[in-house]
Image (cartoon, rainbow, N blue to C red):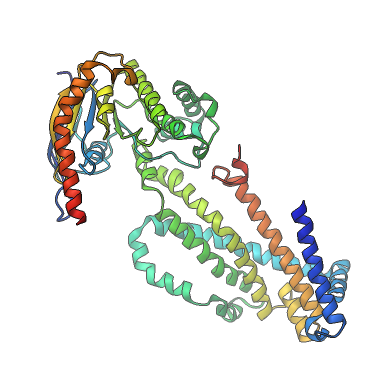
């Protein structure tokens, strides 16, 4: 296995007396690997990511980034959030430039770099627009450019495309794969959509139903690259993988559902 | 345009009603004045230029109260919004100060600062401060945590967070409070003058009232209303200039 970019070592996260969100979770991501994490609702997938980002600190255990224990914000990672995290008072260009300015780049240079990145995600024409003037897909592209402009070695993505319509979503997935293939970095991609996970990932990890969830299974996705996310779903190899992983995931989803019903009655 | 004509028509109709009722003795002109006499007073005040001296004083007081009140309100709001422990300590005191009807402070300010401009500005500041303060405080506390998390991931230091996330977020709240704040500053100036002064529009109204010149009282009210509308329009202009990123604002339509 190549260099480990990110590793969760026996990570537990609990708030107060309540049952822990995560319990002794172990997981590792290689430096050029695209890892997808699937699991039922409320299984702490986002928590796993927030821990890796340094936005949360584990109650027990350790996060390692390229072999060094993480304290505070993970400076080698970029984070693509599920919700809309663009600054509403900055236009697309200024949003992408923001991270560069935070890193001490002079304004003019930051803007030029931002324009370059907007071009790469196909949004050159929309540089002057404010977030509320952009569609959901365009906002995601700006956020993607904002993150990639800082050239992070680890990309953390929390269901980034879940709010998009199906067509836009396939487009964005293909674009993400193209950008990633051009320069391979460690990716941790959270999704509740197993098909998306298989279409994108090198490896799919299934999380157990919460609380006290942890990874319960992992599957290597040996589908050839480059992939087209819409077409690959039709191949027999994809269908076989889907069946195999779904066997495990189904059980966890049912557990989560049963717990949800119990909690409500 | 149609709407404009309808509005002008409504205004004329109201004036005509006022004229008709007072002209034919249905309402006593002594208490209700007469529109044509109010107009005469206005022409006299403006023609002699006498009104401008008083109006200048009132507007100066308003502007000073507005600017100082906003500066204090914004800085305290940012400070308390970012320091929850200080906010928890001061919370009951702030609530008490806000609950107090602050117009009653006017006599105290008059004894402290005299009958000149300073006492009116002080009254205006106490009115403006709380409007702005509460909006900024709330604005800072209600900043979308996702924006903060994203900015931190993009490498923002605590200082950069204040400057690029908390501050602009609070500014949008400040602007929504400015319409109220400018009105408050105006109220502070006029009420202060009314309670004791030697110049200003509030003083003019007080003088007219003392000599039972109800038409001059109405003329003073007309002047104040026109000025308040003009101030409000200026705030709207500033808002369109600075909040063009906001959905639905005039500069944002594409």
User: Residue A178: percent from the left, percent from the top?
Assistant: 36, 18
Q: Is residue A27 left or right of residue A185?
A: left
Which quadrant of the figure contains the N terminus of chain A?
top left
- Confirm whether residue A4 shows in the render: no
Q: Nearer the viewer, residue A146 or A113?
A: A146
- Confirm whether residue B121 shows in the render: yes
User: Residue A116: percent from the left, percent from the top?
Assistant: 47, 22
Decide: is B41 above or below B246.
Answer: below
Decide: is B220 above or below A191.
Answer: below
Q: Nearer the viewer, residue A185 or B33?
A: B33
Decide: is A118 above or below B79.
Answer: above
User: Residue B55: percent from the left, percent from the top?
Assistant: 75, 67
Q: Nearer the viewer, residue A163 or B126?
A: A163
Residue located at (60% from left, 60% from top): B179
Residue located at (31% from left, 35% from top): A159
Q: Is residue B76 left or right of residue A248?
A: right
Which quadrant of the figure contains the C terminus of chain A?
bottom left
Q: Is residue B5 left or right of residue B148?
A: right
User: Residue A133: percent from the left, percent from the top?
Assistant: 53, 37
Decide: is B2 above or below A179.
Answer: below
Residue B245's quadrant in the figure? top right
Looking at the rendered structure, the number of numbered marks drawn on it comes to: 0
Residue B222's quadrant in the figure? bottom right
Residue located at (85% from left, 85% from top): B25
Q: Is residue A17 left or right of residue B215?
A: left
């Amino acid at each position: 296995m190549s260099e480990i970019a990110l590793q969760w070592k026996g990570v537990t996260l609990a708030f107060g007396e309540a049952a822990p969100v995560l319990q002794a979770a172990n997981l590792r991501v290689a430096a050029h690997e695209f890892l997808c994490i699937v699991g039922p609702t409320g299984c702490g997938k986002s928590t796993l990511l927030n821990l890796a980002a340094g936005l949360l600190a584990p109650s027990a255990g350790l996060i390692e980034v390229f072999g060094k224990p993480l304290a505070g914000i993970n400076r080698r990672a970029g984070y693509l959030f599920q919700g809309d995290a663009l600054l509403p008072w900055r236009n697309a260009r200024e949003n992408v430039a923001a991270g560069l300015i935070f890193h001490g780049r002079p304004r003019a240079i930051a803007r030029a770099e931002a324009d370059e990145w907007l071009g790469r995600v196909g949004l050159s024409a929309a540089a002057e627009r404010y977030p509320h003037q952009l569609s959901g897909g365009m906002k995601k592209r700006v956020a993607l450019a904002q993150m990639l402009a800082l050239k992070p070695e680890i990309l953390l993505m929390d269901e980034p495309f879940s709010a998009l319509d199906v067509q836009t979503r396939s487009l964005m997935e293909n674009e993400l794969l193209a950008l990633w293939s051009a320069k391979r970095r460690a990716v941790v991609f959270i999704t509740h959509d197993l098909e998306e996970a298989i279409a994108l990932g090198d490896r799919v990890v299934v999380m157990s139903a919460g609380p006290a969830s942890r990874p319960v299974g992992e599957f290597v996705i040996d589908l050839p690259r480059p992939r087209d996310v819409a077409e690959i779903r039709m191949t027999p190899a994809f269908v076989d993988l889907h069946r195999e992983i779904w066997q495990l995931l189904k059980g966890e989803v049912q557990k989560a559902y049963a717990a949800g019903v119990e909690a409500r009655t | 345009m149609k709407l404009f004509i309808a509005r002008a028509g409504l205004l004329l109709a109201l004036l005509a009603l006022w004229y008709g009722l007072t002209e034919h003795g249905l309402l006593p002109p002594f208490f209700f004045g007469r529109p044509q006499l109010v107009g005469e007073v206005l022409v006299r005040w403006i023609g002699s230029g006498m009104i401008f001296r008083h109006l200048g004083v009132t507007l100066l007081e308003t502007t000073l109260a507005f600017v100082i009140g906003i500066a204090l309100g914004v800085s305290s709001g940012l400070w308390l919004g970012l320091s929850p422990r200080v906010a928890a300590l001061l919370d009951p005191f702030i609530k008490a100060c806000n609950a107090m009807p602050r117009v009653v402070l006017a006599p105290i300010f008059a004894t402290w600062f005299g009958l000149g401009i300073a006492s009116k500005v002080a009254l205006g500041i106490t009115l403006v401060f709380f409007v702005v303060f509460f909006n900024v405080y709330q604005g800072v506390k209600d900043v979308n945590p996702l924006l903060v998390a994203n900015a931190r991931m993009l490498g923002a230091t605590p200082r950069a967070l204040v400057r690029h996330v908390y501050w602009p977020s609070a500014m949008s709240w400040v602007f929504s409070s400015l319409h109220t704040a400018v009105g408050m500053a105006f109220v502070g100036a006029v009420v202060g003058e009314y309670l004791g002064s030697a110049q200003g529009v509030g003083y003019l109204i007080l003088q007219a009232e003392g000599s039972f010149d109800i038409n001059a009282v109405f003329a003073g009210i007309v002047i104040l209303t026109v000025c308040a509308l003009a101030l409000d329009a200026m705030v709207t202009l500033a808002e369109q200039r600075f909040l063009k990123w906001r959905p639905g604002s005039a500069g944002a339509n594409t």
